[in-house]
Structure formats: structure tokens, C-alpha cells
Image: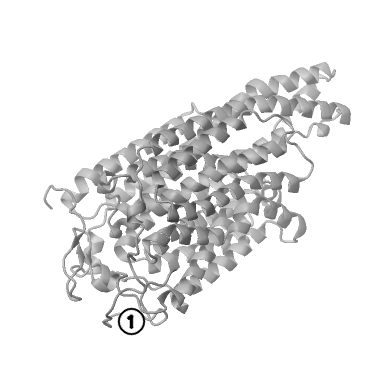
Amino acid sequence: MEDKELPPTQVVSRESNEPIIQNDTFAIKAEALGNDLPPNYYRSIGFIGTIFAFCMSNISQFISFILPANMLTFIGQDIGPSPNLTWVSLAYSLGLSVGFLLVGRLSDIFGRRWFFIGGNALSLIGGIVGAAAKDVETLIAADLLMGLGGSVQISFTVAVSELVPNKYRPSTIVAIFFSSFQIACFGPVISQSIVSTTSQTWRWAYYLNIICAGLAVVAFFFFYHPPTFSLLHMNRSFKQQLRRQDLVGFILFTGGLLLFIMGLSWGGLMYPWGSSHVIATIVVGFVALVLFVLYDAYVHPRIHGDPLLPTHLFRKPGYLAMVAAATGGSSVYYSMNVLAPQQVAYLFPSPSVIHAGWLTCSVGSGCLLGQIVAGWLSQYVHRSRWIMIGSCSMLVAFAAAMTTVEAGESSKWVGLMIMAMFSVGIIETCSLSLAPLSLPSEDIGAALGALGSIRSAGGSVSTAVLSTILNNKVNAIVAPAVMQEAQAQGLSVAQIKGVVEQLATGMFISVPGVDMETATQLSLVRSASAADAWRYVWYAVIAFAGLALILSFTTIDYGQYLTDEVTRKMHGRTVGVVEGEKRSGERSEESV
């Protein structure tokens, strides 16, 4: 192949026997485009069934991560103990992060139908394995399967965006996100209630996933018929296209991202940050990712064919800025899903796990509320650049306000957390629905896949950084304050050692010889000093939010792209489109 930039999308012909869009990767038939939708297409059983499939798939994805993550303590008590318990959530995150780009790019090229059927089938199998697990190691394998399936499930943003008019992308994405509100908003409480009130306890998290993923598989099989490989590639066979794929890039990307995220997740938890395990894993992973980008930019297009990461996307106006701003904002959401329960436990200790769960619900609830509002804003307010700037400014402001929260001020904490996550929800929806609009339609999967993988890596970085800050400040501020109070209360050396061991849980009453009055006083000191420690965490959050704010000024307005154009259409009798049939007339103007 000649040494030249990948040519832009070109409209070649409108004859059905010639490609209408052609470049080095694609030769797309006119029948694949959404220019001639039949009457009542959006009211057909096929389209409605497809939306139902996306909703079930999305609910399954939220169940797979949120419920088990909030049940780890109970899982460890039931089938543990195991030093690998933290790998349950980590395995899911690894599968999800690696799968984003792979699913997006490969489904662009080979068609999306079997990716969505297969991805939900993986999640279904993971649910079955998890529900029957008798040890933590089996559960880790189950969550890895569900994570890989989850990378397909969360990619509904790719699939649904190409099926509806551009101007309805934000509201359609938000509608599907809203289908999982019960888990996204109330997952922590649901988790605690399931464990407390059912005989199968934590296994119900996997039973529920089996139900939703199973329904999604059935619905996708019968209703979801997007353009097939033959409609996307008139000039190549499946085997010819397969030989053009980026095997070296695949190895560098998957290996590099896995090592990088594993190293960040290990640091300060499984191994010290200065250990060879952590340093070597992070460095090797980072180098592999750099080599991956260089290989896909300069080597693979020249010698073989289609790179896994089309680097020409990042030269398009606004895309790189939107990805960078979204990564800065979303990193706050990812880290708060991990750290917010810890802040609740330290600052607002309560014997009721349900009460703690309700407080933690502010993270998911605030984000979903922001997503809903952003769906309306993005669709009707075409100054999307100012929407991004405004939401990032809100995030900085409310992150700064979080530094003023003191022990016992739970209402203040909930209000500020909801507003901070509200701004993150706006950033999320704007980036997912608008970022691909300025790019060629055939690259939408690669665009959102790259965005998802970069955001996920950014979330891992922020979680590692904030967790390290928290651990350091707890050791430097909270532990000395509690030890000093224990000494003032006249506790023995052995009792003080027991108090320090209970620092994370706050269960000082469990230390032999410590009465209720002393335990209460120690708890008050623990909470007050923890408020000081948490200020440093939120100072770092301000830095991440500030980075997002700076980058938001470089984004563009996407209003000009919010048109009636439909990128792709489904086929089959359930939507009234039979491949090979010619249709005349303009696309139906009925709204989604």
C-alpha cells in the first residue's frame, strides 16, 4: 500500500451494484444507508424489539458490575476467604476496558449483529458460572466473561446512534441509559437488600444478569438485523478482509492496556507502589500502548491493511478535544464509584448498611440525572461547546465545595455529590452522542470505542491516584489522631493496636476492653480527622476537573451535524426492509 493518509469517505455511485461509500477499508452499498426508510419504520416490531434488546443489554451491564461490587464483603464471607477477592471487580474492569475499541472497530468492519448476540451470550454464560461458583477464583472467571460481554453491551451507543436521525442521537442514548435507572441509581441499596432478605443472597446478582442477558440474546437474534458484511464490502470476501486485520496492533493494545490497568490496580493494595510488580507492569504496559499507536499510525497501513485504531480520527476537528475533556470529567465518576462508599463509612458511620447504601446512591443518581438533562440540552441547544464548558465549570465548583464537608454533614455531602455527578452526566452524554458526528459514518464504532478505552484508562489512573492519596492521608492524619485519643482514654498498648486494626471499619467496640463510651469518642475523632484527610482527595479531584475544563474550551459546536440524516438502516421483514428490494421516495420523516 502506498505511503499516504487514509482517504476520506467518498460518495462513488448511487447505483445499487456499485459502492456508494468507498475508501481503503469499506465499499458500502446504497442499501446499507438510511436514506429510504419505509413508512412506520420506527414503529415496526423490528425496531421496537431492537430498542428492547438494547435496554435489556444495558440493564445486564449495570447489574454485572454494580451489584457484585457492592457485595464483595458478603461474597468473601460465603465462599472465601481469598486473597484474590478484589480481582472479582478488577476482572470485570479489565474485560470492559480492553473490549471497547475491539468491539467498536471490528463491528464497524464485519457488521454488528453477531457481536451483540455473542457479547450478550458471553454475559449470560458469565452469569451462569457466577451463580454456581463455589470459590472466588471461579467468580473471577465469571466476571471476566461478563466484562468482555459488557464491552459489547455498553457499545449500544454505537449501534443505536447509526439507526436514528443524527438530531435524535442524544435523546435516544439517554432513553436507553434511563432503562437501567433502578440499578444505576439504587444499586448499592438493592445489593444490601438482596443480601439481607433473600436465601440465595449475593447469587441473585448473577441470577438477575442471567434473566436480562438472556432476554437480550433472544431479542437481538430475532429483531436486530443491521447491514451485513456483504453490504459493507462489495470488493472483498470475508477471508480477504480478515487477512487485512491488525494482529500486531491487537496484541500490543490488549496486552498493553491489560498490564497498564493491572499495575495501577495493584499499586498500594496488592503490592507497594515501589515494588517491581507494580513498576514493571505499568511501564511495560505503557510502552506497549505507545508502540501500538505508532504501529497503527505509521506501519500497518503501509504493509497490510486496516489498523485497529484509525489514527486519522484524531485529526478531525473537535474529536480529540472531546475525548480528552470527557476523560478528565469521567475519571471523577469512575473514581467516586470506588471511593464514595469509603467517605461515607469514615465521615458518616452508621450501624445500618442500608442507610450507607442510600447515601452512596447519590453518585449514580446524580450522574443519571445529568445524562437525562444533557439529552435535551444536546438536542435543542446547539452550542455544545458551551454546554461542555458549563458542565466542566460546575464540576470544578462542586468538587471545590466538597472540600468543606465535615464529619456528620451527610445532607450537605449528598447534595454536593449529586451536583458534581450531575455535571459528569452531562459530560458523558455530550461526548458519547456528539463526538462521532464530525467523523465519517463508517468510523463511528472505532470513534466511540477509542473514546471508551481512553476514558476507562483515565478512570483507572484517577482511581489509583486518589486511592493512594487517601491511604497516605489516613495513615498520616487519621491514624495518629485516633491513637492519640486512645492513649488519652487510658487504653493499653494491646488495645491501641486493636483500635488501629479497626481503623478502616470503625468497629472499635469489638476491641476487647473498649466500652461503648470510649468507642463512641474514638469514632468521633476518626470521623473528624477523616474529613481533613478527604480534603486532599478532593483537591486532586479539582485537578482532574480543572484539566477537563481547560480542554473543554478546545471543543467545537456540533449543532450543524444534528440533522435528519440516518447513517444506517436495519433489514428484514420485521422492519419492512427486505435486502434486494428497491424502494423509492424520501426517508420517512417520522420522529424516533
| Left or right position of 400 against 380 | right
| Left or right position of 54 against 557 | right
Visible residue check, residue 467 = no
Quarter of the image that includes the C terminus = bottom left
Dot 1: element? loop
Q: Which residue corresponds to mark 1? A: 578
- The structure residue drawn at horizontal position 83% and vertical position 30%, both measured from the top left corner, is 520
Residue 585 image position (x, y, % from top left): 28, 78
Between 442 and 375, the one nearer to me in the picture: 375
Residue 17 image position (x, y, % from top left): 18, 76
Between 143 and 36, the one nearer to me in the picture: 36
- The structure residue drawn at horizontal position 49% and vertical position 26%, both measured from the top left corner, is 274
| Left or right position of 3 against 430 | left
The total of numbered circles placed on residues is: 1
Name which quarter of the figure residue 240 lies in. Answer: bottom left
| Left or right position of 295 against 59 | left
Between 173 and 79, the one nearer to me in the picture: 173
Check disc 1: other Cα within 10 Å, few if <14, some if 14-19, many if 20+: some
Looking at the image, residue 122 lies above or below residue 408: below
Q: How is the image coloured?
A: one colour
Residue 193 image position (x, y, % from top left): 73, 55
**Residue type for callout 1:** Val
- The structure residue drawn at horizontal position 35% and vertical position 50%, both measured from the top left corner, is 558
Looking at the image, residue 387 lies above or below residue 16: above
Residue 465 image position (x, y, % from top left): 51, 32
Visible residue check, residue 398 = yes
Looking at the image, residue 134 lies above or below residue 367: below
Name which quarter of the figure residue 519 lies in. Answer: top right
